Amino acid sequence: MTSSAPDPAPEPGSTPGSESGSAAGSGPAAESGAAPGRASDAASGGATGGGEPDQPAYADRVFRSGGGIVGGALLLALVLWIGIDALVRGTGSTPWLALAGMLCALPLIVAFTLRPAVFAGADRLRIRNPFRTIVLPWGSVTDIRASYSCEAFTRDNGKFQLWAVPVSLRQRKRAARTQTRRAGDDPHGRTSVNVDVTDHQARMATADRTTADLRDLAERSAGRPTAQGAPVVRWAYEVIAPSAAGLVVLVVLLLVR
């Protein structure tokens, strides 16, 4: 009878299956880090028996105004600096006026600069404006346009402005000039007939590119069963209430001063 050679002893610090575990984790884990939606697709596909899901699920795309965020942070710092200084060094009714003024001003600054955002998901578009939050299922959206402001239109003739996507006419002119220069055959500074109309990135401003992306997502997702429903509007009382209270207190203090 031939005796088989004994299995080699595992190296110190290693456990059985560690190589397979690391090899298996290096693929999907890295992919999920680069594209979270694909990892969720694989998970849903495995849960249903390994088949491909009917519709891919992606994380919500978030659109914000970088200039608004920077400006809002600077305004908040300025108001807090002036208000705290008045609270500490003020006399008489000055600290109370400063406190009421900050209570009125700070929520408004946050509402108009830091709060606006647009969340584009697979089933709906969520618009967070200064005083309202609007949820639009893609099935209810008929068009998204950017003229002097970016607006979303619904089937019930509703129109909602996207505060987080400001329209810049200067960027549009700059994009048009860039595309004209790339054509290289317009010495008089007029738009050439040979301009490359397929070069969307060069001839579109930031707001126009965002609008085109949202419109394309609306067209692709409008037929999903989970993307149906009516628009839902919710007022941001967490912003309105403190600002209104601060305004009332400020007016009362000014009247009895």
Image (tube, rainbow, N blue to C red):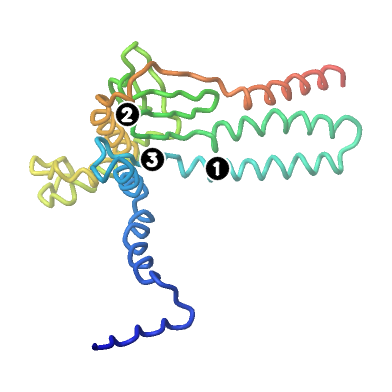
Label 3 Cα neighbours within 10 Å, binned few <14 / some 14-19 / many ≥20? few
Considering the numbered disc 1 on the image, is that residue within a helix, a strand or a loop? helix
Name which residue lies at 31% across and 48% down. 42
Considering the numbered disc 2 on the image, is that residue within a helix, a strand or a loop? strand
- Number of the front mark, 2 or 3: 3
Quadrant in which residue 33 is drawn: bottom left
Say above or below: 102 vs 223.
below
- Front residue (pair 76, 219): 219
Find disc 1 in the rendering and name its residue: 71
Say above or below: 200 vs 25.
above
- Residue type, label 2: Ala
Quadrant in which residue 64 is drawn: top left
Name which residue lies at 66% across and 45% down. 77
Find disc 3 in the rendering and name its residue: 61
- Front residue (pair 183, 222): 222
Position of 253 with respect to 246 (left or right) is: right
State the quadrant of the N terminus: bottom left
Quadrant in which residue 235 is drawn: top right
State the quadrant of the C terminus: top right
Find disc 2 in the rendering and name its residue: 146
Considering the numbered disc 3 on the image, is that residue within a helix, a strand or a loop? strand
- Residue type, label 1: Gly
Mark sitting on residue 215: none
- Number of the front mark, 1 or 3: 3
Position of 135 with respect to 5 (left or right) is: right
Say above or below: 232 vs 97.
above
Position of 17 with respect to 92 (left or right) is: left
